[in-house]
Image (cartoon, grey):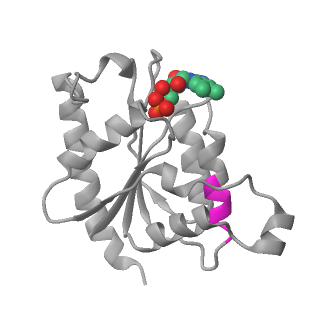
């Protein structure tokens, strides 16, 4: 199974980039992993007039191609003001303008990292809602790393054994399920 992975942050020192890179190293063998930077998918704010005059922008087209080329997608997203970051919602909106919608039928796993005490699950529920609107299969379990500024060592490795165990078990379950379920996509 081809798995696209990215963190929905542009920041160089992004906690979500650290989390997705840890997850990338922990995916069970036997899958083709495509780790991308959200920075490759920079695009302007959605504007219907811009779409009419110029179509989907280059960053949106790159993201669409990346989604089309994978059966499963793992996203690590920050939470902004208890919700989905505008940058990620904008990217989902632009990519939804392609027909057929590239998210349709994709297996998706959501995770996120935040320096806060609560984690990112309030925001991830909004990511889930937008992707389910596009007929993606979003895995029921999500992982939010709270106090993430303390979760990584100087080599950006997750240090807490319980968190590593939780992430490993989630990746094992998701890849086993998604590998099976993606075979039902026409
Ligand atoms: C506009 C904005 C809103 C934020 N709102 C939240 C929030 O609701 N919950 C939270 O846990 N962190 C919030 N944060 C803090 C982010 O979790 C923190 O900046 C995090 O490092 C962003 O992810 P990144 O490191 O991957 O860029 C917010 C940050 C910004 C810039």
Residue at 52 percent across and 64 percent down: it is 63
Q: Where 166 falls versus 8 (above or below)?
A: above
Residue in front for this viewpoint, 183 or 82: 82
Q: Position of residue 91 (x, y in %)?
A: 61, 55
Q: Position of residue 183 (x, y in %)?
A: 32, 77
Q: Whereabouts is ligand 1, in terms of quadrant?
A: top right
Residue at 37 percent across and 63 percent down: it is 72
Taking 143 as reference, is 102 left or right?
right
Q: Quadrant of residue 32?
A: bottom left
Q: Quadrant of the N terminus?
A: bottom left
Give the magenta-colored segment's residue range.
Answer: 91-97
Q: Quadrant of the C terminus?
A: bottom left
Q: Position of residue 151 (x, y in %)?
A: 29, 21
Residue in front for this viewpoint, 167 or 59: 59
- Seen from this angle, which residue lies furthest right? 49
Residue in front for this viewpoint, 44 or 116: 44
92 drawn magenta: yes
Magenta span: helix, strand or loop, mainly? Answer: helix
Q: Quadrant of residue 97?
A: bottom right
Residue at 37 percent across and 78 percent down: it is 184
| Count of numbered marks | 0
* Residue 81 visible, this angle: no
Q: Where 33 falls versus 126 (above or below)?
A: below
- Seen from this angle, which residue lies furthest left? 29
151 drawn magenta: no
Taking 78 as reference, is 53 left or right?
right
Q: Where 174 falls versus 51 (above or below)?
A: above
Residue at 70 percent across and 54 percent down: it is 44
* Residue 185 visible, this angle: yes
């Amino acid at each position: 199974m081809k798995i696209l992975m990215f963190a929905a942050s542009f920041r160089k020192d992004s906690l979500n980039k650290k989390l997705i890179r840890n997850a990338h190293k922990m995916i069970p063998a036997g899958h083709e992993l495509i780790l991308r930077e959200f920075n490759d998918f920079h695009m302007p704010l959605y504007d219907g007039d811009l779409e009419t005059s110029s179509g989907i922008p280059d960053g949106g087209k790159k993201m669409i191609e990346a989604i089309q080329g994978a059966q499963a997608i793992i996203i690590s997203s920050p939470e902004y003001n208890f919700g989905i970051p505008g940058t990620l919602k904008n990217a989902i909106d632009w990519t939804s303008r392609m027909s057929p919608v590239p998210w349709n039928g994709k297996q998706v796993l959501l995770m996120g990292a935040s320096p806060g005490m609560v984690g990112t699950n309030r925001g991830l529920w909004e990511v889930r809602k937008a992707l389910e609107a596009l007929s993606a299969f979003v895995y029921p379990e999500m992982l939010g790393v709270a106090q993430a500024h303390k979760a990584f060592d100087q080599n950006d490795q997750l240090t807490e054994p319980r968190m590593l165990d939780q992430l490993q078990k989630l990746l094992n379950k998701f890849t086993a399920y998604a590998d099976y379920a993606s075979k039902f996509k026409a």
